[in-house]
Amino acid sequence: LAKTTQPISMDSYEGQEVNITCSHNNIATNDYITWYQQFPSQGPRFIIQGYKTKVTNEVASLFIPADRKSSTLSLPRVSLSDTAVYYCLVGVLPFHAGNNRKLIWGLGTSLAVNP
Amino acid sequence: DGGITQSPKYLFRKEGQNVTLSCEQNLNHDAMYWYRQDPGQGLRLIYYSQIVNDFQKGDIAEGYSVSREKKESFPLTVTSAQKNPTAFYLCATAPRGDTEAFFGQGTRLTVV
């Protein structure tokens, strides 16, 4: 199983760039790297997903080095509303026939954005 | 999210009673999932279904049951055999071949 390690918590201020790094040393060839955001008492929300190099969308960037043993979620110019728990997941949904690399949800990183 | 409806948002039951949590989706997604989240823990997979009339056990299926009679619906029954049912339950869906899951708003079940 693809286990991930990420900081338990981080603090930042409005307007700053936040980088959250996730380690996943036993990532498999077919595994994707996916980040979710979760607010209290709500379901997680997909942020970004990548396989290698860099992926960017309207809310974040994901940097993946060549060995894929880690990844960094970058949130540009955070605001108070970005205060949430961020989960790094490695694997694929238990959807594909024969797949045994189910997504494992860790504790996530609790990001606090201060005024 | 918008296309996934979990009801009710809060649910209270007495110990020993079965309770069914509803999950309905209008996203036309093939796969549906049930997760459980406890305070300070990540999500744990209870059951999942890739297609109508078929479902698979996840990592913590004991004490739970599901059905998938319609593509739009994947209800979860928490039976009296579940030793610690108080938790936040999340339903998710995914389109065929995709690796992104879409989550509902969750149902917080409290058993007293």
Image: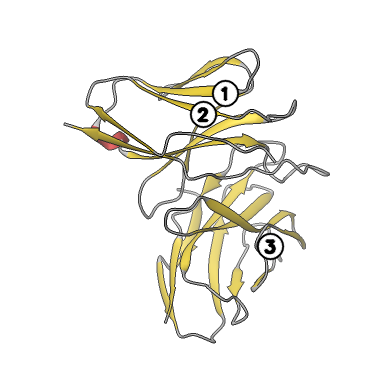
Quadrant of the rendered structure where residue A14 is?
A: top left
- Residue plotted at (48% across, 45% down): A107
- Residue A22 is labelled as 2
Q: Nearer the viewer, mark 2 or mark 3?
A: 2
Q: Quadrant of the C terminus of chain B?
A: bottom left
Between discs 2 and 1, the one toward the N terminus: 2
Mark 1 to mark 3 CA distance (whole Å): 40 Å
Chain to which the residue tagged by mark 3 belongs? B
Residue beneath label 1, please?
Answer: A70
Does the residue at mark 2 contact the one at mark 3 (Cβ under 8 Å)?
A: no
Residue type of the residue flagged with mark 1? Ser
Q: Is residue B14 above or below residue A92?
A: below
Which label is found at residue B70?
3
> Residue at 57% of width from left, 23% of height from top?
A70
Q: Position of residue A32 (x, y in %)?
A: 65, 29
Q: CA distance from mark 2 to mark 3?
A: 38 Å
Q: Write down the chain letter for disc 2.
A: A
